[in-house]
Image (spheres, rainbow, N blue to C red):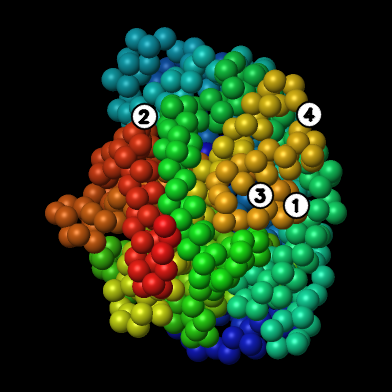
């Protein structure tokens, strides 16, 4: 997708979630806990009217075709019109996407999303001439344009960035053909998303209290954390047993997505799909391989952590359904959503009054869709576009992990808010490389706050385990996924068929290496690749790792009260894409071109494991 689409009331929790047997319909939930899409368009009819207007306005771009090198005024007018069209298209896409995601069964909003996607494809066709023409302008002529048209200076960094990729931009007609293929290219993810969110169903199991409970993706996380190993076992088999029935289909879908990445990389003259994926963010391949080496060569802390869990649970070996088993049994670790909002506000207080005031507005102002309902998209995300506040999708069930998810997604939302407030449209969309910094920094501040405000050893042990689990899941597991993604693309580039058997084999080898000897790998867990939507995002997951390491370093500076640290961080949030990602992070106080931030994070896990082992009186020797 283009830059335009990169994209306190009391309540009764049982009433919000229904009787535990079936998810409630959306109409049964309190509207206070649903997002307010009227802030984008007041009605579906208003969306339709804007769709029709934009459909007519898009061809206006083509009146500039062949003229961008003629004079500075025409170049400026074209870029300004492009920004206006993209901003309007972003709002159309946002409304359609959120309406669709709140209940993926509704055909009307499936159609809205498809139509928005089709309109985006037509926009890309109409604008495909722009970058090739920009690249054809001689350097001295472009500098003359800057001198004669001061308003054009706004676009200098954008133009420098476009021209940086000159060798990989095709002639206008070829760019047009690639743009026309955009909707087809999105097919693998669209198919997987519909399957994963609307079609797949899981059987019911019996919970700890003997009640029949329908397994859903949101409930699975609760069930797999049950203190009852039988419940965890049954949840795992209900969940993964449903996916493995579709392995050949899902392997074909993922294989097609990978081939799509390779096709575009080769079409644009890149040496590999990895190189092509990193180029838009101006990230050297060495940064990616540095992640795999710095984390992959320091697996011992993870192995110690899992060995500690095995001993604590008194098991000969951990099974996949034991990886999230609680090591401290306290029912009060559930947290109602109003309390979660208050906790997050308190935890983020080191970021200052302006940040907190906007966060309070988000909590009360219709930014967030809180609870799971029938047909709702699984997981959580933040989605923002220029001209309207960001939106956050949750499927909140009250676990501590849900509290961290709230802090995480609000980090994304606040990053979008500040970037859009302080930057013109052209620089308002921060790159994916830095996207996970704001979200993960919020999680670091939250865990620090929770640890600081407890004297109960059991609570502290629980929180230390949660902290270690963050590093396990965000740094180690995402590095493992990044390694798998790299190897799968390399295998496909060499002509290997990505069958379900091969995917299981490669994923199994990596999983065994990363998790180590404390874990027995159930055959179905080798197929974990089949349910991960991020594998359709074209080398996305490594950014969780770099984001976590950068965020950890920045959070430590802020918590230590280092002079200027908070101001530098808030400036980072406000700069959007006005400079290259590595420069933005370096200016904020962390250098991600070397291994030190990653190695520091692996050392942190080792420290947490040692602290937990001492509290549990367990030896890991």
Q: Residues within 10 Å of mark 2 (few under 14, many from 20)?
A: some
In the rendered image of this protein, does residue 216 appear above or below residue 250?
Answer: below
Q: Nearer the viewer, residue 269 or 68?
A: 269
**Where does the N terminus fall, quadrant-wise?**
top right
Task: Tell which circle, 4 or 3, labels the residue nearer the N-terminal end.
Answer: 4
Q: Position of residue 447 (x, y in %)?
A: 37, 67
Task: Tell which circle, 1 or 3, labels the residue nearer the N-terminal end.
Answer: 1
Left or right placement of residue 44 versus residue 554 in this view: right
Instruction: Name the residue beneath numbered marker 1.
Output: 523
> Mark 4–mark 3 contact, CB under 8 Å?
no
Task: Tell which circle, 3 or 2, labels the residue nearer the N-terminal end.
Answer: 2
Instruction: Name the residue beneath numbered marker 4.
Output: 497
Distance between mark 3 and mark 2 Cα atoms:
32 Å
Distance between mark 4 and mark 2 Cα atoms:
41 Å
Q: Position of residue 229 (x, y in %)?
A: 66, 74
Q: Position of residue 364 (x, y in %)?
A: 45, 76
Element carrying mark 4: loop
Element carrying mark 1: helix
Instruction: Name the residue beneath numbered marker 3.
Output: 533
In the rendered image of this protein, does residue 296 appear above or below residue 324?
Answer: above
Q: Residue at x 59, y 32 (%)?
A: 486
Distance between mark 4 and mark 3 Cα atoms:
20 Å
Q: Nearer the viewer, mark 3 or mark 2?
A: 3
Element carrying mark 2: helix
Q: Residue at x 32, y 15 (%)?
A: 144
Left or right placement of residue 561 versus residue 370 in this view: left
Element carrying mark 3: helix
> Mark 3–mark 2 contact, CB under 8 Å?
no
């Amino acid at each position: 997708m283009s830059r335009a689409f990169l994209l306190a009331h009391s309540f009764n929790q049982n009433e919000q979630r229904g009787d535990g047997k079936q998810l409630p319909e959306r109409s049964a939930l309190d509207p206070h806990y649903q997002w307010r899409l009227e802030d984008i368009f007041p009605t579906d009819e208003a969306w339709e009217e804007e769709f029709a207007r934009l459909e007519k306005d898009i061809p206006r771009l083509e009146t500039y075709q062949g003229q961008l090198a003629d004079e500075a005024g025409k170049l400026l007018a074209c870029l300004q019109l492009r920004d206006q069209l993209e901003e309007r298209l972003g709002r159309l896409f946002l409304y359609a996407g959120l309406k669709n995601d709140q209940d993926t069964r509704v055909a009307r909003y499936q159609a809205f999303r498809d139509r928005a996607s089709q309109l985006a494809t037509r926009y890309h066709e109409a604008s495909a001439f722009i970058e090739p023409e920009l690249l054809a302008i001689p350097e001295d002529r472009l500098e003359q344009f800057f001198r004669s048209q001061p308003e054009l200076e706004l676009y200098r960094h954008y133009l420098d960035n476009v021209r940086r990729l000159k060798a990989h931009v095709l002639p206008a007609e070829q760019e047009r053909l690639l743009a026309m293929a955009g909707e087809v290219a999105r097919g693998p993810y669209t198919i997987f998303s519909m399957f994963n969110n609307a079609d797949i169903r899981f059987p019911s199991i019996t919970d700890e209290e003997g009640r029949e409970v329908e397994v859903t993706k949101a409930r699975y996380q609760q069930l797999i954390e049950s203190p009852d190993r039988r419940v965890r076992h049954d949840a795992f088999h209900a969940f993964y047993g449903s996916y493995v029935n579709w392995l050949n289909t899902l392997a074909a879908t993922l294989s097609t997505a990978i081939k799509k990445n390779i096709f575009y990389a080769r079409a644009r003259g890149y040496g590999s799909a990895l190189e092509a994926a990193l180029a838009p963010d101006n990230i050297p391949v060495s940064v990616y391989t540095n992640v795999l080496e710095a984390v992959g060569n320091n697996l011992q802390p993870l192995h110690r952590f899992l060995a500690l869990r095995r001993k604590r649970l008194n098991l000969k070996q951990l099974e996949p359904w034991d990886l999230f088993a609680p090591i401290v049994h306290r029912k009060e670790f559930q947290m109602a959503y109003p309390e979660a909002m208050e906790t997050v506000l308190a935890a983020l207080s080191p970021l200052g009054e302006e940040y907190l005031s906007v966060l309070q507005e988000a909590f009360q102002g219709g930014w967030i869709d809180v609870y799971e309902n029938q047909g709702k998209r699984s997981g959580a995300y933040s989605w923002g576009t220029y001209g309207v506040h960001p939106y956050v999708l949750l499927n909140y069930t009250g676990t501590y992990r849900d509290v961290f998810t709230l802090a995480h997604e609000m980090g994304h939302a606040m990053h979008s808010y500040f970037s859009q407030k302080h930057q013109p449209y052209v620089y308002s969309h921060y790159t994916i490389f830095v996207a996970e910094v704001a979200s993960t920094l919020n999680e670091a501040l939250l865990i620090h706050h929770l640890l600081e405000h407890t004297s109960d050893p059991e609570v502290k042990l629980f929180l230390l385990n949660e902290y270690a689990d963050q590093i396990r899941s965000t740094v180690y597991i995402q590095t493992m996924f990044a390694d798998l993604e790299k190897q799968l693309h390399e295998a496909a580039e060499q002509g290997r068929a990505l069958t379900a058997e091969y995917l299981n084999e490669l994923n199994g080898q990596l999983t065994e290496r990363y998790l180590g000897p404390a874990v027995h790998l159930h055959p179905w867990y080798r197929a974990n690749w089949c349910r991960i939507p991020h594998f359709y995002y074209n080398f996305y997951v490594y950014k969780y790792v770099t984001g976590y390491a950068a965020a950890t370093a920045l959070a430590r500076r802020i918590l230590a009260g280092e002079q200027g640290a908070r101001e530098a961080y808030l400036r980072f949030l406000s700069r959007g894409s006005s400079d290259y990602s590595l420069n933005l992070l370096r200016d904020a106080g962390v250098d991600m071109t070397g291994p030190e931030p990653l190695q520091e994070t692996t050392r942190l896990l080792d420290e947490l494991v040692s602290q937990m082992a001492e509290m549990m009186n367990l030896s890991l020797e």
